[in-house]
Amino acid sequence: MGWIIKSRDGEVICRGSSNRTHVGSALMAEALAVREALRKAKELNLQSLQIFSDSQVLVSAMCKGLDLNEIAGVQQDIKSLATLFCPISFSVISRLENSQADSLAKSGLDRLMLA
């Protein structure tokens, strides 16, 4: 998974990637990335956030307050962390717009495959 935190003007504040074995779906991978980004934002004492994801299912669930069984535990973590930021929003972006985070995720996967 990969994530990037940027300032309002688009400057990269930090970025990260990690890998996990046995992630069951792209939805779970995206939820894990959002959770890690929220944890890092908390660490950085950020006050407000805009979360961008190329997962329409995840963003829709977060915006509508829907619970998804497939990612229930991680989604609960996201909801809990989200309460720390005001305002916070979740928005869908295209895969092309999310290419930097996808590249970080792929580098994490490459590290896993080499291990």
Image (cartoon, rainbow, N blue to C red):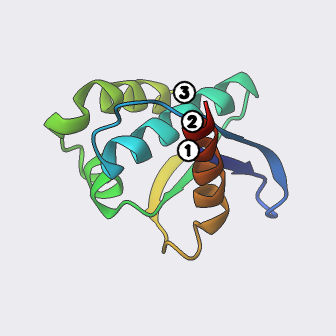
- Does the rendering let one see residue 68? yes
The numbered mark, 3 or 2, whose residue comes first in the sequence reads: 3
* Gap in angstroms between the C-alphas marked 1 and 2: 5 Å
Question: Which residue sits at x=66%, y=51%?
Answer: 104
Circle 2 residue:
112
Residue 114: percent from the left, percent from the top?
62, 37
Mark 1 vs 2: CB contact within 8 A? yes
The label shown at residue 84 is: 3
Residue 67: percent from the left, percent from the top?
18, 38
Q: Quadrant of the C terminus?
A: top right
Which residue type does callout 3 highlight? Leu
Question: Which residue sits at x=56%, y=76%?
Answer: 96
- Does the rendering let one see residue 85? no
Tell me where residue 36 sits by quadrant.
Answer: top right
Which residue type does callout 2 highlight? Leu
* Gap in angstroms between the C-alphas marked 3 and 1: 30 Å
Question: Which residue sits at x=67%, y=33%?
Answer: 41
The label shown at residue 109 is: 1
Which residue type does callout 1 highlight? Leu
The numbered mark, 3 or 1, whose residue comes first in the sequence reads: 3
Q: Is residue 56 above or below residue 46?
A: below
Question: Which residue sits at x=47%, y=33%?
Answer: 82
Tell me where residue 56 sits by quadrant.
Answer: bottom left
